Amino acid sequence: TTHINNIETRNYVTVQSGRRVVPTDLGVTLVQGYHAIDPELALPTIRSHIEQQLNLIAEGKADHSAVVAHTLRQFTEKFKNFTDQIERMDTLFEAAFSPEGSSGKPFSKCGQCLR
């Protein structure tokens, strides 16, 4: 329920009658971008694996420090891969949300990192 509330609050989905979850244009574009850069980011497998590891820690069957270290390494690699390919996300957002989407220019540049 918390996850659904979060993605609704962030405007990635709307929740319709009967708790039917419908993606917004923003949600669809994000998933397409995640899938284009790292398909695992668009699938529930990573989240599920982490939840399984947390359960093992709670049961005393996994070492907290080892799980945290592994998860941090995994997400550090994914973050680096993602930022190395961020232009792919820019292109998708430009096509979906910019009237100049057909210009072929990147969507925007960050004011701090200039990506």
Image (cartoon, helix red, strand yellow):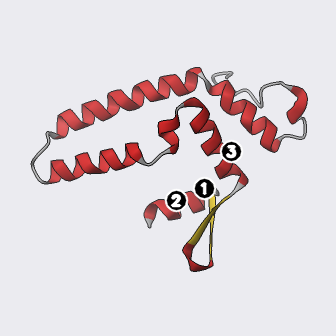
Of badges 1 and 3, the one in the foreground is 3
Q: Residue at x 9, y 49 (%)?
A: 60
Report, in whole angstroms, how far the alpha carbon at label 2 lies from the one at label 1: 6 Å
Query: Quick check: marks 1 and 3 in contact, CB under 8 Å?
Result: no
**Residue ID for mark 1:** 10
Q: Which mark is residue 99?
A: none
Q: Residue at x 32, y 45 (%)?
A: 49
Report, in whole angstroms, how far the alpha carbon at label 1 lies from the one at label 3: 13 Å
Where is residue 111? Give x, y as percent. 70, 27
**Residue ID for mark 2:** 6
Closer to the N terminus: mark 1 or mark 3? 1
Callout 1 crowding tier (Cα within 10 Å): few <14, some 14–19, many ≥20: few
| Displayed quadrant of residue 69 | top left
Where is residue 109? Give x, y as percent. 73, 26
Q: Is residue 85 left or right of residue 72?
A: right
Q: Is residue 65 left or right of residue 36?
A: left
Q: Residue at x 58, y 37 (%)?
A: 35
Q: Residue at x 56, y 25 (%)?
A: 83
| Displayed quadrant of residue 96 | top right
Q: Secondary structure at mark 2?
A: helix
Q: Quadrant of the C terminus?
A: top right
Query: Quick check: marks 2 and 1 in contact, CB under 8 Å?
Result: yes
